[in-house]
Amino acid sequence: MKNPIKIEPLKLLLALGITSAASMQSAVLASDYDQGLKLYQAKNYAAALPLLEKAANAKTNAWQAQYLLGNTCLALGKMDEAKAAYQRCLATCNDKSIQDHAKGGIATVDAYKQAQAQAQSLRRTTSTTGTSGTSGTGTSGTRSSSSASAAESEEDEPTEKKVDKNAQIRNELLAKARQEANKIRREAEEQIKHEKENSNEVFKYSDGSRGLDISDEREAQIRKEAEERAKRVMYEAEQRAKGYRSN
């Protein structure tokens, strides 16, 4: 168990008399961000969205707001907005772990759009196949058994190919999602390691020793958020895969 030795920045600022208009404006922006962060952590993404948008728009170089805005938009299915927020985050953030997470978010958006394009292409192909010309009847109004068998084979072949293609697309979608989910979990562990190595917060351990570290709660939060993202990636992939049924 780690007990933090806290330094309260707000009290320090007040003690130094830093009460300029700029600092007050920053406090207002921080308020929007903090409220948005709380709602985001509570998974109330719809309520968090306008607050994070306000914080991100007011200070475009605040990568924290851009990053959370990207995650929130992704959770709400606002893919274009999510990608734009992640890109703004990458333009201003120097933290490698956050950069990797933002890149992962962009990859998720791109994979989603690619799957949509594949689905539309498949629907167009299926529609074209289904509306292609059918053979007419002969003068006698009947066809020989050999001709009927040949026609049935021609009709069955596209269906079999469609089934095989659907199964292939499903497997590819799910395999890619599993890779992305595992990558998210690995990145979470790398983020924990990175934050531990760069922490400036002093903790007192149960054996009485002290050292720079991050809290147990912070570690749990990073892993929890990563697991939620991983589950969301898998859920979205499973939903997309349902559009490629074999029957």
Image (cartoon, rainbow, N blue to C red):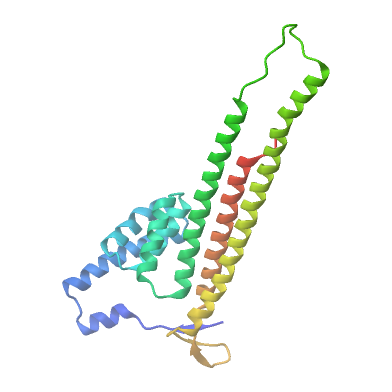
- Quarter of the image for the N terminus: give it: bottom right
Q: Position of residue 7 (x, y in %)?
A: 37, 83
Which of the 4 quarters of the picture holds residue 17?
Answer: bottom left
Q: Position of residue 227 (x, y in %)?
A: 57, 63
The correct choice, above or below, for 178 with respect to 149 in the image is below
Q: Can the viewer see residue 39?
A: no
Report the residue that reaches farthest toward the left: 21
The correct choice, above or below, for 135 with respect to 184 in the image is above
Report the residue that reaches farthest toward the bottom: 209
The correct choice, above or below, for 231 with respect to 146 in the image is below
- Left or right? Give the position of 31 relative to 195: left
Residue toward you, 35 or 67: 67
Report the residue that reaches farthest toward the front: 139
Q: Can the viewer see residue 206?
A: yes
The correct choice, above or below, for 206 with respect to 220 in the image is below
Residue at image x 57%, y 74%? Answer: 189
Residue at image x 62%, y 46%? Answer: 241
Report the residue that reaches farthest toward the top: 140
Residue at image x 66%, y 39%? Answer: 245
Residue toward you, 19 or 98: 98
Residue toward you, 155 or 243: 155
Which of the 4 quarters of the picture holds residue 55?
Answer: bottom left
Residue at image x 54%, y 60%? Answer: 229
Q: Position of residue 166 (x, y in %)?
A: 66, 42
Q: Position of residue 127 (x, y in %)?
A: 58, 30
- Quarter of the image for the C terminus: give it: top right
